[in-house]
Amino acid sequence: MKTVTLYTDGACSGNPGPGGWGAILEYNGTEKELSGGEENTTNNRMELTAVIQGLQALKEPCIVELYSDSKYVIDALEKGWAWGWRKKNWIKSDKKPALNPDLWEILLQLTIKHELHYHWVKGHAENPKNNRCDELAVAQWKLLK
């Protein structure tokens, strides 16, 4: 399988409010930037959408090195929380409903197709690709304001 690096970020102006997402796919020295937005959404929905869109852009199963500054996304995948929520009909261990089950369902299916390795990065810090994803995401929500 090919190894691809995926950087993602989501942003919102207000939470909820207009939001945007950005993703960068890297393979063999080539980069592809993706971005989009929604008029009324949340930051976490944009974080999830960035990962989903990045994975959906892959034309075949890949090993994916995923870089995100979202603990929500990284922890829920890496620690298996999202699978547990799904098994319990989208109810968390604190008996509250898990948020964004529609997006988690899509993302969990994509994690079956691809082999993901998770990397949390500090947001707005030293990672130029994560910073670029933030720029893409912010540009998208600004278009919707």
Image: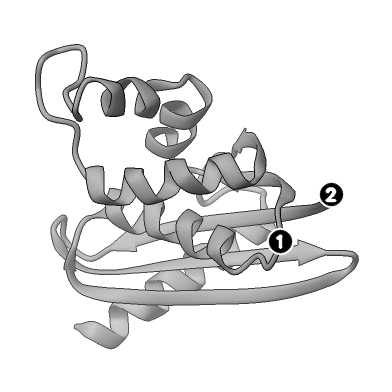
Q: Is residue 17 left or right of residue 24?
A: left
Amino acid on which disc 1 is placed: Glu
Discs 2, 1 touching: Cβ within 8 Å: yes
Residue type, label 2: Met
Earlier sequence position, callout 2 versus callout 1: 2
Describe residue 110's horizontal placement relative to residue 62 as left or right: left
Which residue position holds label 2? 1
Q: Picture quarter containing residue 31?
A: bottom right
Spot occupied by residue 32 in the image (x, y as percentages of width and height):
69, 75
Estimate how packed mark 1 is, as few (under 14), some (14 to 19) or many (20 or more) residues with alpha carbons within 10 Å: few
Q: Which residue is mark 1?
A: 60
Between 112 and 34, the one lying in front of the other is 112
The structure residue drawn at horizontal position 21% and vertical position 56%, both measured from the top left corner, is 42
The image position of residue 126, as x and y in percent, is 66, 48
- Which residue lies most toward the right here? 28
Q: CA distance from mark 2 to mark 1?
A: 9 Å
